[in-house]
Image (cartoon, rainbow, N blue to C red):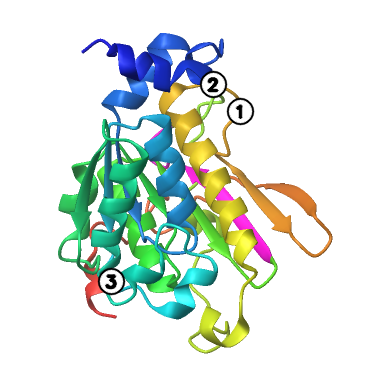
Amino acid sequence: MPLSTDEIERYARHIVLREVGGPGQQKLAKARVLLVGAGGLGSPLALYLAAAGVGTIGIVDDDVVSLSNLQRQVLHGTPDVGRPKTDSAVDALARVNPHVTVAAHPFRLDAANAMELIASYDLVADGSDSFATRYLVADACALAGRPLVTASLGTFDGALTTIRAHETGPDGAPNPTWRCLFPEPPPPGTVAPCAEAGVLGALAGMMGSMMAIEVIREIVGFGQGLVGRLLVVDARAMRFETISYGWDPDNPVTGTAPTIRDLSIHARR
């Protein structure tokens, strides 16, 4: 469908960009993006995707808003404390852009529901704070043939990459998977959770905003994406580094002898 007069005015600053234009804005309007998590990363990500006019934004999160979330989870406000995060997100995004459809999935993503949910979207953006969820999402996206934009937060650092494990690169070699970069999650207890280690609130905003840029670039198709590149941010020194990584033929999902053919490995954990 063509953009309405109101939408043309709303997205005018996108439409005048040569890299986006009317066709790019139409791609955004038709896109279906699933956000895993409505927390520190998912909050700015959701706000900017809604503002950009992404047609359907799905949000999967089984948590409720707590007072300690509000230091960094800007999708929610003080009156939302105690509410499901998906409910708060739906209300917040409706205020940002009534032209966007927001689908709430107020449950925990697991091995039983991940494939069906992920397959119903064009692209997945993972801002979860759990290693188990991160590996589940990455494996599911590889098996379902869906691109994945994934980011993580530390106390003063963050990382971001894009994975299109179901495709090949310009050289004909398979694109890497998440497990090519990090074959296995760290042992339990070796990485302190946010509640113990803390996190710089504004860093979540910066990383979530960069996730939004990467999602928009993947949908519209401009610039050099982060497939095979890990962007690492050090907020202490305000230093940015990009680390290249490639396909590992020994990876268990898309390697030469794959051992992960479904999500049953995650059901056993």
- Does the magenta portion include 158? yes
- Does the magenta portion include 228? no
Question: Which of disc 2 and disc 3 is earlier in sequence?
Answer: 2
In what element is the residue under mark 2?
loop
Q: Position of residue 201 (x, y in %)?
A: 60, 66
**Which secondary structure dominates the residues rendered in magenta?**
strand
Give the label on residue 4, or none.
none
Residue 256 showing in the rendered view: no
- In which quadrant of the rendered image does the N terminus lie? top left
Query: Does 43 sit above or below residue 24?
Result: below
Badge 1: residue crowd in 10 Å (few <14, some 14–19, many ≥20): few
Query: Does 67 sit above or below residue 210?
Result: below
In what element is the residue under mark 1?
loop
The residue labelled by disc 3 is 266
Residue 118 showing in the rendered view: yes
Residue at screen point 16% across, 61% down: 113
Q: Which residues are magenta?
A: 157-167
Mark 3 vs mark 1, foreground winner is 1
The residue labelled by disc 1 is 224
Query: Does 30 sit above or below residue 41?
Result: above
Q: Position of residue 179 (x, y in %)?
A: 48, 58
Q: Give, as a three-letter code, the residue at label 1.
A: Gln
Q: Position of residue 49 (x, y in %)?
A: 41, 39
Q: Give, as a three-letter code, the residue at label 2.
A: Phe
Q: Nearer the viewer, residue 172 or 143?
A: 143
